[in-house]
Image (spheres, grey):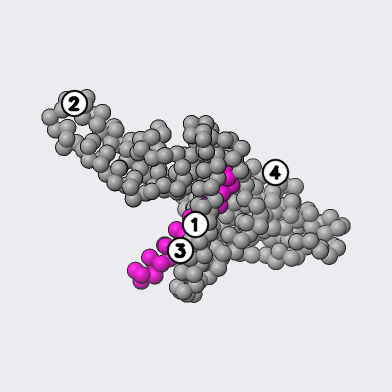
Amino acid sequence: MAYSDKVIDHAENPRNVGTLDKEDPSVGTGLVGAPACGDVMRLQIKVSNDGVIEDAKFKTFGCGSAIASSSLATEWIKGKKVEEAEAIKNVDIVNELNLPPVKIHCSVLAEDAIKSAIADYRAKQLPSAAEPQIDE
Amino acid sequence: MDPFAVIGAPRRFDLDLSALEKTHRELARALHPDKFAHASTSERRIALEKAATVNEAWRIVRDPIRRAEALFGIGGIAVGHTREPQASSAFLMDVLEQREALAQARKDRDMVKVRALGEHFEARAKAAEEKLTQGFALAFAGRESAPDRGALETVLPVLGELRFYRRFIDEVSAIIEEEEVS
């Protein structure tokens, strides 16, 4: 399949690959997978006290488009407010990377990963999250 | 196209693939262009189309994932992106951690670890295939043409699990090949 230059660039030189401490209360971890193809993606954000995403890391096991989508997603959300990051839509990723129709699900996965990381971060900000958890 | 009908297989997940391979070979031989050397143009074209159908049916039936997809399709259950249930986060976490362990083993060129991870996922894939066998048997029991939707939906997440396992196993094979070449 013909990948666009931007997909190849992100897939060969992915930005922000890595891990943040998932126990850190300022870190939100999003974990998503695509049962239809077997791709898995983890996207993490570190949020400052004033609600700005100061760092983002990802790890994706999947095709070039899935890696490029998540790499681009981390690049975009860094420096954004959580609410701004939340507004990113998969079509923005499709347009930027020129993804063909059969690879649109990769951008959906990246959008889900951002939302899932934000949801995890917010859950940690709730007062009860500071209490020790007994249940797994 | 119903690949099971084309290849003469029953609608079930566990199949005698070596017997079906023989059936496929016989069908393909009967449709071989050599047999139609003296036939009319339209007969030749029909034979060619039939041969393509038979080959495609065999490719579907012999592959566990495509076979399962075909059985879900017969039952009217849509498969593919956005149509299948999302895997649990505990499952995804486990798969991701094991993928990281595999990537590390590849970096360390620790082939013992690579093979052990491969065997672990082969076993999990086998268990998933057994679950599919039971699920489809239940769904198709006594109603081959109209399987039970509820029973099919119950077993649908297992297809997704199997795809995650398959991706892992493919990656193990790629690492082993890479190691043998170097």
Give the Cα separation between the discs numbered 3 and 4: 38 Å
**Kind of element beneath mark 3:** helix
Judging from the image, mark 4 belongs to the subunit labelled: A
Q: Amino acid at mark 3?
A: Val
Viewer can see residue A100? no
Residue visible at 24% across and 31% down?
B47
- B165 falls in the magenta region: yes
Of callouts 2 and 1, which one flags the residue occurring earlier in the amino acid sequence?
Answer: 2
Viewer can see residue B18? yes
- B65 falls in the magenta region: no
Give the Cα separation between the discs numbered 1 and 4: 42 Å
Give the Cα separation between the discs numbered 3 and 1: 16 Å
Judging from the image, mark 1 belongs to the subunit labelled: B
**Kind of element beneath mark 1:** helix
Q: Amino acid at mark 4?
A: Ala
Classify residue B104 as left or right of residue A77.
left
To the question of a shared chain for discs 1 and 4, the answer is no
Q: Which residue is mark 4?
A: A87
The answer to the question of whether label 3 and label 2 lie on touching residues, with beta carbons closer than 8 A, is: no
Give the Cα separation between the discs numbered 2 and 4: 60 Å
Q: Which residue is mark 3?
A: B172
To the question of a shared chain for discs 3 and 2, the answer is yes
Classify residue B93 as left or right of residue B162.
right
Q: Relative to B5, is B155 above or below?
A: below
Q: Picture coordinates of residue B41 (x, y %)?
A: 19, 26
Query: Which residues fall within the magenta stretch?
Result: B155-182
Work out which residue is located at the far front of the displayed protein and give it: B142
Residue visible at 78% across and 53% down?
A122
Check disc 1: other Cα within 10 Å, few if <14, some if 14-19, many if 20+: few
**Kind of element beneath mark 2:** helix
